[in-house]
Image (cartoon, rainbow, N blue to C red):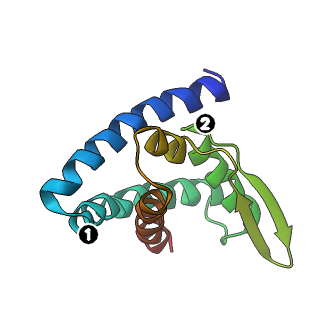
Amino acid sequence: MGKKSTFNAAKSGLTTFGLFFKDAVPEIGLDKALAIHASHGKLVGAGWACMLKSELGGRKVNLAAWQRAFTKICDEVGIAPEFEKRRGTLTAKICDCPIYAGCIEAGLDHKTVELLCSQRLALEYEEVQ
C-alpha cells in the first residue's frame, strides 16, 4: 500500500474514532474522554521503546536510530515527517496528519484534536524515555 492510500485508510478509521469521541463526550465529559484516550499512550509508548531498542541493537541512543524508529511508526499511518538536525537535536515536523484530518472530518474542533494528541503523546514520550 502506498503512503497516500495508507494515509487515507488511517484517516477513514480516525474519522470513525472522531465520531465516537464526539458522541462519548456528552455522556462522560471531555476531561474523562481525554483521559481515557491519553491512557493508551503508555501502551503505544512501550511499542515505540521496543522499536527503538531494536534499532539501537545494544548501542546508546542516538539521533539516527531515533529518526529511523520514528519514521517507521509514522509510516504505519501514512505520515511523512520532515526532520531537521541541529547541534545534537532532532526536530520532526508533520505537515499532513491522518489523525488530525480524520478528527476534523468527524467534526471535532482544532483545540479538542490538539488536546487529544498532546495528552496522549505526553504519555507515549514518557514511556519511551
Label 2 crowding class (10 Å Cα cut-off): few <14, some 14-19, many 20+? many
Residue at 49% in and 34% down? 11
Where residue 79 sits: x, y (%)?
63, 42
Q: Amino acid at mark 2?
A: Gly
Label number found at residue 45: none
Residue at 66% in and 23% down? 2
Mark 1 vs 2, N-terminal side: 1
Determine whether 110 is above or below 91 in the image: above
| Furthest residue in direction bottom, as rendered | 87
Residue at 31% in and 58% down? 37
Where residue 127 sits: x, y (%)?
43, 70
Label 1 crowding class (10 Å Cα cut-off): few <14, some 14-19, many 20+? few
Residue at 60% in and 36% down? 78
Q: Viewed as shown, does residue 49 lie left or right of 25?
A: right
Dot 1 corresponds to which residue?
31
Q: Viewed as shown, does residue 93 lie left or right of 18?
A: right
Q: What SS does tag 1 mark?
A: helix
Dot 2 corresponds to which residue?
78
Tell me the quarter of the picture where residue 18 sits.
top left
Where residue 45 sits: x, y (%)?
44, 61
Determine whether 24 is above or below 7 in the image: below
Q: Are marks 1 and 2 in contact (CB under 8 Å)?
A: no
Where residue 26 sits: x, y (%)?
18, 55
| Quadrant assignment for the N terminus | top right
Query: Observer-nearest residue: 56 or 73?
Result: 73
Distance between the alpha carbons at the discs numbered 1 and 2 = 29 Å
Label 1 or label 2, whichever lies nearer to me, is 1
Q: Amino acid at mark 1?
A: Asp
Tell me the quarter of the picture where residue 56 sits.
bottom right
